[in-house]
Image: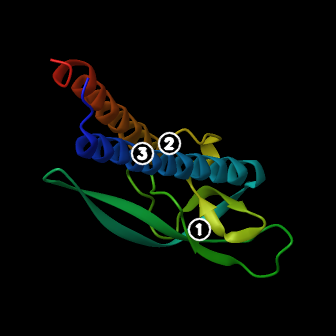
Amino acid sequence: MKIHYVPTVLLLTSTVVIAVVGVVLLLKGRSVRRTAERFRERAVPVSATVVELQAKDLSIRAEPDTRYFALVRYLPDGADEPVEAVTLTDLPSPPPRVGEQIDVAYDPEHPRRVDVVATERTVEGAGRTWLVLGTLVVLLALGVAAGWLVLVLVVWTS
């Protein structure tokens, strides 16, 4: 059996590089998930007043999608002055009006970190995009390695 060194080096190097990128994406997803879990563990629920709505347009495929984030004002436990902060996640539809009260949760260590979705007691979606991308990239690396094996065992032995 003759080994073709140039394609072997290129394919195996590509496999390693792609796998490293996939692992980095998976680690990023895990980090985002853990950060969300730690926030959830420390979060203190409080009622906040919507000061302003900030619209952010997302383009998914060709259809625009507007998401609303709220600038809210609330009084953290033990504080003398209220804090204003923008929510970390978008508001459920339909968004509240300016001046309305909404339930939020804030991080007592970082009072400007406030989240509306955190009041649901879940971190289900946190880091999901990173984890899916990482999994797909690792699968791509395995596909490149499988392609090299097909070349070695089938094409080059014929």
The colour scheme applied to this rendered structure is rainbow
Q: Is residue 106 above or below residue 79?
A: above
- Residue that carries the numbered disc 3 in the rendered image: 16
Residue at the extreme front of the image, as rendered: 2
Residue at 61 percent of width and 42 percent of height: 120
Determine crowd level at label 1: few under 14, some 14-19, many 20+ residues with C-alpha closer than 10 A. many
Q: Is residue 143 above or below residue 67?
A: above
Q: Earlier in the sequence, mark 1 or mark 2?
A: 1
Q: Determine contact: label 3, label 2, CB under 8 Å.
A: no
Check disc 2 and report the residue beneath it. Answer: 125
- Kind of residue at badge 2: Gly
- Would you call the spot at circle 2 few (<14 residues within 10 Å), some (14-19), or many (20 or more)? few
In the image, residue 67 above or below residue 19: below
Q: x, y percentage for residue 17?
A: 40, 50
**The label number, if any, that marks residue 38 in the structure image:** none
- Circle 1 or circle 2, nearest the eye: 2
Q: Nearer the viewer, residue 89 or 15?
A: 15
Instruction: List x then y, in percent, for residue 35.
Output: 65, 54
Q: Nearer the viewer, mark 1 or mark 3?
A: 3
Query: Seen in the image, is 151 located left or right of residue 67?
Result: left
Q: Quadrant of the N terminus?
A: top left
Q: Amino acid at mark 3?
A: Val
Q: Looking at the image, do the residues carrying marks 1 and 3 touch, with CB atoms under 8 Å apart?
A: no
Q: Which residue is mark 1?
A: 49
